[in-house]
Amino acid sequence: MTEKMLVRALKGGKNTKIVTLSGKKITKMPSSLDKLPGLKTLNLQNNRISKVCSEISTLTQLTVLNLGNNLLEEIPEEMKYLISLKKLHLFGNKICKFASGACDGLQNLILLNLNNNELAWIPQEISRLKNLKYLSINHNQLASIPKELCFLKNLFELHLNYNQLICIPEEIKFLKKLQKLLLVRNNIEVLPKGVCRLKNLRILDIAGNIIQTFPSGFQNLKLRECYCEGNPLFLKEPVTAVQQDDVWSLQEITSRFIMNELSEKNPFVMQAITWHPLVRNIMSQRRKCAICEKYFLTIWLECVEFVPPSKKWKISRNLQLVPLQILICSYTCFNQRGPNLFGIAQV
Ligand SMILES: [Zn+2]
């Protein structure tokens, strides 16, 4: 049946470049595809295909493959033979994994559409899709993304709406060409500081997450559109708080002393530290006070600074002022803060 349909579709003879067999209730891919080595576009959308046939591996000239709305359960290994493929549509299947090696030959892939599947994780091998520009994995079950995804340095657009992401790796900063980042309806609590390094980012949509503040530096992004409805963003409303005294642990006092001596290049401390790699490791977790610019380790005051968003940004209504997360080393510094900086009331 399918073979006959293919024969009919092949009116152009052996030089056929495009085959469209969409919405034909096909359950099995036509195996005579191997008679079409010059095929460029294969559209099998809206069928009932649960497995790709092995003959697909002969289609080394294929540039577009549409298997959207079928019954595939994995990204098939055979994809690795499609070395000319530029666009791969696999939306609306039941895909829950990548077969091993599936990414190996897709060096020319530009677009990958995996919307509406059942993926709960992405393998590190995704980083092999070196030319990928558009990656869309909306409506899946991703709880995390591997940092290797951030090594796709040609990526322009990343769509991860409607998943279960709780965080985004700091390595996102490596996506230097990223222009559009969509993270609607996830469970993200904190945007990594790395987002502030995305110099080409123009559209950010984080609506429907649980973000309260933005990393400092966020206000300098050259966004055109920024949407953040449905997040419990901090609002600028005055709260009176009880002033506390700074009580630091001995570890905090010692580490602050060492870190600040190191930053002033005290030769004695600098030499001593080379003998203590473990201490050096702990020190690498240090953070800097926004007021005095000295270092601290485990004790700080979390504050919010409100800054007006850039006039060039098209923003959602709940973002009159951008709440930035600011860390301060002590109440002494807190008392020297500017008028736009607020402590966060502990409830
Ligand atoms: Zn300070």
Image (spheres, helix red, strand yellow):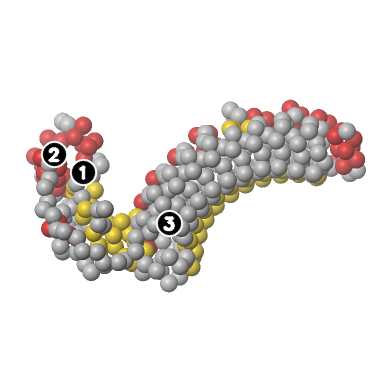
Amino acid residing under circle 1: Thr
Secondary element at image label 3: loop
Q: Quadrant of the N terminus?
A: top right
The reply to whether residue 258 is visible in this rendering is: no
Which of the pair 290/198 is nearer the observer? Answer: 290
- Residue at the spot 87% in from the left edge and 42% down from the top edge: 9
According to the image, label 2 marks what residue? Answer: 251
Amino acid residing under circle 2: Gln
Which of the pair 235/249 is nearer the observer? Answer: 235
Q: Earlier in the sequence, mark 1 or mark 3?
A: 3
According to the image, label 1 marks what residue? Answer: 298
Which label sits in the foreground, 2 or 3?
3
The answer to whether the beta carbon of the residue marked 2 is less than 8 Å from any atom of ligand 1 is no
> Seen in the image, is 343 located left or right of residue 100?
left
According to the image, label 3 marks what residue? Answer: 231
The reply to whether residue 304 is visible in this rendering is: yes
Q: Earlier in the sequence, mark 2 or mark 3?
A: 3
Secondary element at image label 2: helix
